[in-house]
Amino acid sequence: MFDFLLLFTSVIAGVLGAILGLGGGIILVPALTLLLHVNIRYAVAASLISVVATSSGAASTYLKDNFTNVRIATLLEVGTVTGAIAGFLLAQKINSTELYFLFGCMLFLSAVLMLKNRKTPLPGDEHAWAKNLKLSGANYNVAGVPWALGVMFVAGVLSALLGIGSGILKVLAMDGAMKLPIKVSTATSNFMIGVTAAASAGAYLLSGDVRPELAVPISIGTLAGSRIGARLMLKMEAALIRKIFMIVLTLVSFQMMLKGLALHE
């Protein structure tokens, strides 16, 4: 029964991770710890391995269909890595308990803002950096590059301070600041999270927290789910993807706020 639940949860995590560009950790870690009573360290380690699998499974499909913007992914990773270094240096000096609550509030506000109709950038709205770096795609322009880099820096800081993935903020940066189509945002985020998770997974592997009996079935499930999710995403309406993302964003925001309140008590 345990193996079946593990595999089923992994497939669902892979499907949603591929569609939304978030990785499977948002689903896997709570499921493993709360439902299957797995140690949190082993759950996080297995989740990171699964994110690499999700990214690999979905990225090949998205790259082939030209949804992934590799130039944007490379640029934004600079902001994430810089923020992660800053967060690591701040981790010893800042109490992160209150940050969970503030982060949850920020995510909830972002979900509310996503309800507003936004306009696709016109040719004249293309940011100068985007033009110089050739970031725009064949059917869309890119705006707000400095804002997106700022969001990615914050994402890196929060990842280091709170030990969370930054897939949500990656999608928000591309969708909200750069005004990319939601499918391009999620596809590019899928490409990026694999790179980020691979580095973190290596650290957990060296520390001995990666358990093969968990990591192997989870990776198989998420890889299969990501293949399904990638094909579904290509056929789904952009409005539906945005609605699903807002629902997940709202759930995660409340989870973060509750965690912050629990740690504060």
Image: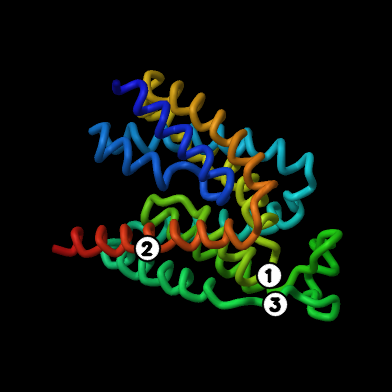
Q: Residue reaching furthest bottom?
A: 124
Q: Position of residue 176 (x, y in %)?
A: 60, 70
Q: Position of residue 88 (x, y in %)?
A: 43, 54
Q: Secondary structure at mark 1?
A: loop
Contact between labelled residues 1 and 3, with CB atoms less than 8 Å apart: yes
Residue labelled with disc 3:
119
Q: How much space separates mark 3 and mark 1, taking CA atoms?
A: 8 Å
Q: Secondary structure at mark 2?
A: helix
Residue 253: which numbered mark, if any? 2
Q: Indicate left or right for 81 with 250 as reference.
A: right
Q: Choose top left, top right, bottom left or bottom right for residue 60.
A: top right
Within-10-Å neighbours for mark 3: few <14, some 14–19, many 20+ = few
Give the residue displayed 25% in from the left and 61% down from the top: 258
Name the amino acid, label 3: Lys
Residue labelled with disc 1:
179
Q: Earlier in the sequence, mark 1 or mark 2?
A: 1
Q: Choose top left, top right, bottom left or bottom right for residue 8.
A: top left
Q: How much space separates mark 1 and mark 2, taking CA atoms?
A: 22 Å
Q: Secondary structure at mark 3?
A: loop
